Amino acid sequence: ETGVTQTPRHLVMGMTNKKSLKCEQHLGHNAMYWYKQSAKKPLELMFVYSLEERVENNSVPSRFSPECPNSSHLFLHLHTLQPEDSALYLCASSQVRGTEAFFGQGTRLTVV
Amino acid sequence: QKEVEQDPGPLSVPEGAIVSLNCTYSNSAFQYFMWYRQYSRKGPELLMYTYSSGNKEDGRFTAQVDKSSKYISLFIRDSQPSDSATYLCAMSASGGSNYKLTFGKGTLLTVNP
């Protein structure tokens, strides 16, 4: 396994469901990120973890809850989502104080 | 004014053409500049990385940064159908722990055989 791996690749969930997205990086990086990509919008940074500590939360609704148990793993816990939360959710990693971010393939989320 | 402006296209060119993709930005603190390529239904893939002003070449790809004009470009020579993708510019400021990337919206490129 190399790079950044995200599971699942596709997820359909109802507004009352609870689900989690998983990200794992095999690059030895110590910063990890969640981004949201919606049609016709720039990538939106949601959360940043640096050395397993959350350092940024860009006014993301509380229905999104990140978890970083160690420098290789990142989760995004989802509950009571809205249809407008349907998007591609991307995980990325980099070195702390580095700038090149490497992305996973993303999870295509559809909220029905 | 948005921090990063990128024409979304779409841009359609014949195979073999030279492609020019551009972004402008407003934040003079940006020092690191990247271009990502994103194929449909895939994550962005880092293509080019440049620090400060100047040019960088990698095979058919050349990245240029003009900090005085706050303008960056990506040139693709001898474009191929496999270059068809969305190209995203990204940039970040220098110093300390500022690792936040700011992205453009992306330009959709189609190279026709």
Image (cartoon, rainbow, N blue to C red):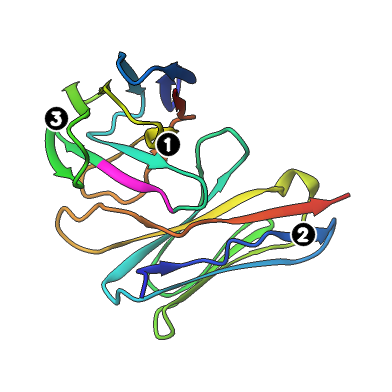
Residue where numbered disc 3 is placed:
A52
Hey, which residue is sitting farthest right in the picture? B113
Cα distance between the residues tagged 2 and 3: 43 Å
Residue where numbered disc 2 is placed:
B12
Quarter of the image containing the N terminus of chain A?
top left
Whether residue B67 is visible here, answered yes or no, is yes
Q: Is residue B34 magenta?
A: no
Q: Secondary structure at mark 1?
A: strand
> In this rendering, would B77 be left or right of A18?
right
Whether residue A90 is visible here, answered yes or no, is no
Residue where numbered disc 1 is placed:
A103
The kind of residue on which mark 2 rests is: Ser
Which label belongs to residue A31?
A: none
Q: Residue at x 60, y 50 (%)?
A: B86
Q: Secondary structure at mark 2?
A: strand
The kind of residue on which mark 1 rests is: Phe
